[in-house]
Amino acid sequence: MNYSDSEFPWITIETFGFEHGVPETAIGCLLIDVRGASLDDPADRPELADRDGKDEDVIQHVMASRLAFTRIEQVVGQGKALLDFNSEKNFTLRILIGDDTGRTRAVVLGDAVAEVLNGRGIPTEVEHHHFDIDTPK
């Protein structure tokens, strides 16, 4: 199916922090938990601990993880497979990506997955639910 002919996004990626709760879900969601996904956590590095997933140093740190590109391709593949399977129903697929706080790894992964999907002609939007919530130090 040619998704690029659409005027609306076929996939919506929503990032969040498990400590704030999972966004309300309905059928058709793909839930990705990156808390144990072999992605380096910026919170483990004092110089990155107060930064978020839009910070270039945080992005580089997460993307330098040994399995970062593998995880991105896995999520892209799972999302595309679900989209193709349900394409006749003409619905927007929601991909929920969560880490501890919703401010770092989930944001980096969500933005990267959206970039790949958009680059492959599948209109994708991203919403970061807990990006602006301050986390206790």
Image: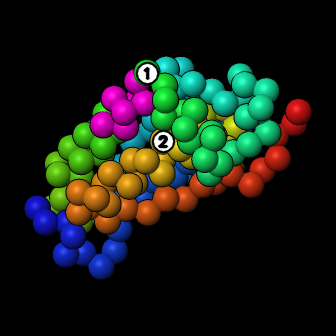
Whole-Å distance between the Cαs marked 2 and 1?
14 Å
* Residue 94 horizontal side relative to residue 46, left or right: left
For label 2, the residue is 109
Percent of width and height locating residue 133: 78, 50
Within the image, what quadrant is residue 43 found in? top right
- For the point 60% across and 55% down, which residue is it? 128
Q: What's the magenta bit mostly, secondary-structure-wise? A: helix
* Residue 107 horizontal side relative to residue 13, left or right: right
For label 1, the residue is 66
Q: Nearer the viewer, residue 1 or 87?
A: 1
Vertical arrangement, residue 122 with respect to residue 27, above or below: below
Please give the label number shown on residue 23. Answer: none
Q: Nearer the viewer, residue 66 or 80?
A: 66
* Residue 73 horizontal side relative to residue 95, left or right: left
Q: Residue furthest left?
A: 1
- For the point 69% across and 45% down, which residue is it? 52
Regarding residue 44, the answer to whether it shows in the image is: yes
Regarding residue 25, the answer to whether it shows in the image is: no
- Tell us which disc is closer to us: 2 or 1: 1
Within the image, what quadrant is residue 6 found in? bottom left
Give the quarter of the figure containing the N terminus: bottom left
Stretch in magenta: 67-73
Amino acid type indicated by mark 2: Leu
Percent of width and height locating residue 10: 31, 63
- For the point 31% across and 65% down, which residue is it? 123
